[in-house]
Image (cartoon, grey):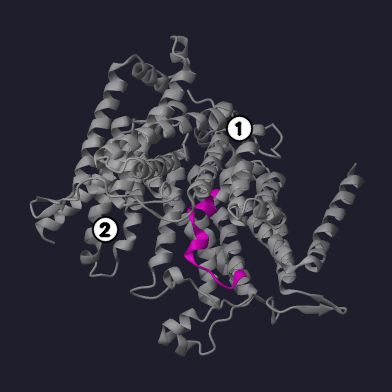
Amino acid sequence: MDMPTFIQQIINGLVLGSVYALVALGYTMVYGIIGLINFAHGEVLMVGALTSWSIIGLMQDAMPGTPGWLMLLVSMLIACVVAAALNFAIEKLAYKPLRNSPRLAPLITAIGMSILLQTLAMIIWKPNYKPFPTLLPNVPYDVGGAVITFTQIMILGTTAMSLAVLMWLVNYTRLGRAMRATAENPRVAALMGVKPNVVISATFVIGAVLAAIAGVMWAANYGTVQHTMGFLPGLKAFTAAVFGGIGNLAGAVVGGVLLGLIESLGAGYIGPLTGGVLGSHYSDIFAFIVLIVVLTLRPSGLLGERVADRA
Amino acid sequence: MKHKKIVVFLLAAIGLLVLPLVLQGVGNAWVRIADMALLYVLLAVGLNIVVGYAGLLDLGYVAFFAIGAYMYGLLASPHLTESFEWFAAMFPNGLHSPIWVVIPVAAGLAAVFGVLLGAPTLRLRGDYLAIVTLGFGEIIRVFLNNLDHPVNITNGPKGMGQIDSLSFFGHSFGKSIEVAGYEINSVTLYYYLFLTLVVVSVVISHRLQLSRVGRAWMAIREDEIAAKAMGINTRNLKLSAFGMGATFGGVSGAMFASFQGFISPESFSLMESVMIVAMVVLGGIGHLPGVILGAVALSALPEVLRYVAAPLQSMTGGRLDASILRQLLIALAMISVMLLRPRGLWPAPEHGKSLPSTKS
């Protein structure tokens, strides 16, 4: 294949990967602190995207003259608040009472929450696919023969900014230090005066904000929203988190971006490489094949620490 | 004491045998619900071997269900003879395999896949294992969805139809029979078939649990390193757990295909795997009566409520239709049962059970 196509796949992969990375961070932070797979995380992304769709619809009716970027920004902020409140409530209702239960119990409530949120979203927003309006100027820019749209640039920029803020939060604030301490050893952290409940709630809220941002960007990039839209990005992002080494923030980002690139390049090249026998329909399984290969060779993920066999 | 147990047992047996005849009088739809509940019991009992006994969280169990179903679909539908001329030349009347061939083949094939998929996961623990098995489940589904070209094996998203009913001594389960002037429907016949399979699988599973192998599985579940130190061959035992669990899945898949007469990749989504895990955990992980209860509760109860819920539907102006209501109920049941009874509805007695998680 030629160079422009290659660059195009890289761009698509980076955009996809940055969304995965944002969602994967939510999974990995929660896992790092309470050792739970938050199955409902993809649903938080979905609620974020649908909320922003509703807000944009309202604003278009009430204030028709508002510039697109402003509507997107406002709706994204509101989506973040709603998602944060939702994830906060989920943790209090479904996970907190089960903190000392058998390991599988919170997993089941998480799955239940995921189904519940999807169903409620279907009731609230109706099951049809809804077009997400194009709010940013739709001018393609030329990069070495390939094109990148303004929305894609916005996605890359927002992801970079969110990551910078998160890194600052985790590495340089009191809360971040408390979070790292709890992830390291919750009992000792509690003895040192860290309030575990506050830290856990904060983790869920931060994860939800990242997921809502990812959801709005996903919707802006693909142009549709629906109540099942959270499932696939959620699953892929979780894969990305495990791929990078679950519990490890840098790992989630690396895993997300790599996964996006692998999927995009794989989908672009598998057809020509196999003479058309395998098509791009198989793109969804690259993620899993890579994951299985990586985990077989490195059972704790790319950047995961080698933990002792006793969890 | 012993006497009382036998009486309860006999009453339960009679109840289970008479149930479809009663339901048949109300409507065949009810018997179908009972049939599906039995299939789910079969699946849950199988998964319980992997998750409950050996402690390996498998989120891709539906893959084995799919393998069994597609194997039966290929053996018993006109699909192969329609797609391949050489095949039509070999079997001009099509393959119509009897039950004696189907069950062992489905069991064997699924077991082979179980061991194959289990092998690369041996070094993984807990959640890593969960995500890899989940990946396998999705991979199998994507293949089923796309293997209609270049060679049409699975007929892709359209699925396979016109699958024969099982036949038993030359009699097809698809037709009703008359016993002493009383008509027994096809769905009721399937009920008895599934009930037999469930009883056999429960007995196998129970005996396994008490056997040397079963104790070894539980030792691995409690502490793999200690188990290894005690001389347990953890590799072979984990593989045998995967294989054993897959066997049950494969058999119930074949049953599902013949019962429905139609299969498509949609029936084998991740949600299905998740539901089976939920049945096992909700009922009481590693405890057979609990697992059966969980499977029946999660599969039959929402269906029953669906029929009862018609007034609610008209009250909300059709916005809450039956399938939405079913999902809502499943979700609420999963959350509330876990919150109220974290060890499941009917948990195993405390001794020899894993301690509450002590992650630190």
Predominant secondary structure in magenta?
Answer: helix
Q: Position of residue B151 (x, y in %)?
A: 36, 75
Q: Nearer the viewer, residue B342 or A25?
A: A25
B23 left or right, relative to B292 = right
In the figure, residue B250 lies in which quadrant?
bottom right
Q: Amino acid at mark 1?
A: Ser
The magenta segment is B260-274
Chain under callout 1: B
Residue A243 vertical position relative to residue A5 in the rendered view, above or below: above
User: What is the number of the mark on residue A267?
Assistant: 2
The residue carrying mark 1 is B354
Q: Is residue B353 visible?
A: no
Q: Secondary structure at mark 1?
A: loop
Q: How many marks?
A: 2
From the viewer's side, name the closer residue of B121 and A171: A171
Image location of residue A81, percent across then percent down: 40, 31
Q: On the rendered image, what quadrant is the N terminus of chain A found in? A: bottom left
